[in-house]
Amino acid sequence: MLSSRILSGLTRIRPTLTSIRTMAAADGYAFETLAVSSPRENVYHVELNRPDKLNAMNKTMWKDIGQCFNKLGEDTDCRAIVLSGSGRLFTSGLDLSDMSGIVSLVMGDDDVARKCRALHHLIKEFQDAFSSLETCPKPVIAAIHNACVGGGVDLICSADIRYCTSDSWFQVKEVELGLAADVGTLQRLPKIIGNQSLVRELAFSARKMFSEEALRSGLVSRTFSDKQSVLNGALDMATTIASMSPVAVQNTKTTLIHARDHTVQEGLDYVAMLNMTMLQSEDLRIAAMAMMSKGKKPTFAKL
Ligand SMILES: CCC/C=C/C=C/C(=O)SCCNC(=O)CCNC(=O)[C@H](O)C(C)(C)COP(=O)(O)OP(=O)(O)OC[C@H]1O[C@@H](n2cnc3c(N)ncnc32)[C@H](O)[C@@H]1OP(=O)(O)O
């Protein structure tokens, strides 16, 4: 409860007026392999959009994902993002028909050091593309339906929240292709589900994990009956998030990611440094005023 002295101080500060623009179409988001729209205020929807190829991830899609999430991170109209797949399943993973670049690098007759340099560059590029969901300060909700294979698991592990349909299944399929997964699953999945035994079982055997187990293990936090319901559920959550202070939400995301990768004390030090600045934000006053005036929807400036 805020004391009356603090409250009267807050009320003396002039409220900021914010103009809110509802996006009908997401300008500047034209991608060959992604469909981007803004179905709700401050909420963007990114759809993997190669339904004829079961949303298999070709080189263009990797590049598009990186560019799209970097742009969303900078877009002050965007406060929360829903990621889904068009067509009959979320994604079938790496496009197996688009591996000529990798194959020619491996099979080419370049010197081994030069091949390694080129492969390292390529893998880092792919890693950065998926890490863009994590470096984007806006929360990303993955709405998964049916299959989420290989690179799909890497991708959703970079999201903040995962929902799926009851017919969903997940497969860390890389070992079956003679690969160690290298774009995030082996680093992030153990931290998401917190069960090394289960992660190793999935990653060594490439067995499918179905929605019920995904829910039980904590890979997803909610399941829905069908694709439309999971999309609606994700959009509703994104709308709720988008109604909060963007300062609070975005700093919460970066603080949680920092906390995942550091000790508790380092995390506390980090958030103390962050909040000595962020507590001075106008958003704190606006949120507190709205809460005190029961039912009044707060309006926050763009961030
Ligand atoms: C540095 C690199 C880092 C990245 C690493 C990533 C690694 C990975 O992602 S490993 C996993 C790769 N993916 C797969 O192995 C999945 C292969 N596909 C399937 O298992 C099945 O297609 C699937 C279970 C997803 C769906 O089965 P369904 O019976 O419903 O459909 P299909 O008849 O099999 O497929 C329909 C057409 O789509 C083509 N297709 C499916 N997946 C891929 C793919 N990953 N890449 C390219 N094309 C794919 C399939 O060939 C069919 O085509 P067509 O015969 O022309 O109709």
Image (tube, grey):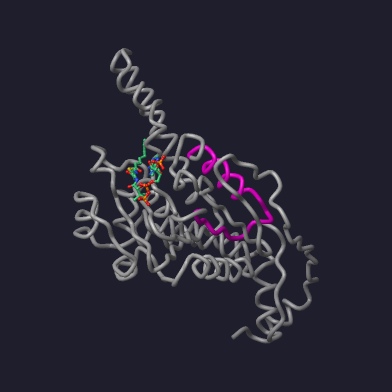
Up-down: is 65 above or below 292? above
Closest to the observer: 134 or 98?
Answer: 98
Quarter of the picture containing the N terminus is bottom right
Please state if 220 lies on the left or on the right of 62 as rendered.
Answer: left
Does residue 231 show up magenta in the picture? Answer: no
Nearer to us in this view, 227 or 36: 227
* Quadrant (top left/top right/bottom left/bottom right) for the C terminus: bottom right
Ligand 1 occupies quarter: top left
Report which quarter residue 114 is drawn in. Answer: top left
Using the rendered view, name the quadrant where residue 268 is placed.
Answer: bottom left
Position in image of residue 192 (x %, y %)? 34, 60
Relative depth, front residue between 189 and 295: 189
- Choose between 270 and 40: the one closer to the eye: 40
Quick one: which residue is furthest to the front in this view?
52
Please provide percent x and percent y for residue 293: 71, 85
Quadrant for residue 260, please give it. Answer: bottom left
User: At 33% from the left edge and 41% from the top edge, which residue is drawn?
Assistant: 182
Q: How many marks?
A: 0
Residue shown at 72% from the left, 62% from the top:
301
Task: Name the residue at 49% across, 67% down.
Answer: 230
Residue 263, position in %: x, y? Answer: 34, 58
Please give left or right for residue 239 compared with residue 11 in the image: left
Vertical comparison of 193 with 118: above or below: below
Q: Is residue 283 left or right of residue 178?
A: right
Q: Which residues are magenta?
A: 62-85
Q: Residue 279, relative to residue 57: is it above or below?
A: below
- What percent of the width, then of the height, locates residue 178? 23, 37
Q: Is residue 159 left or right of residue 283?
A: left
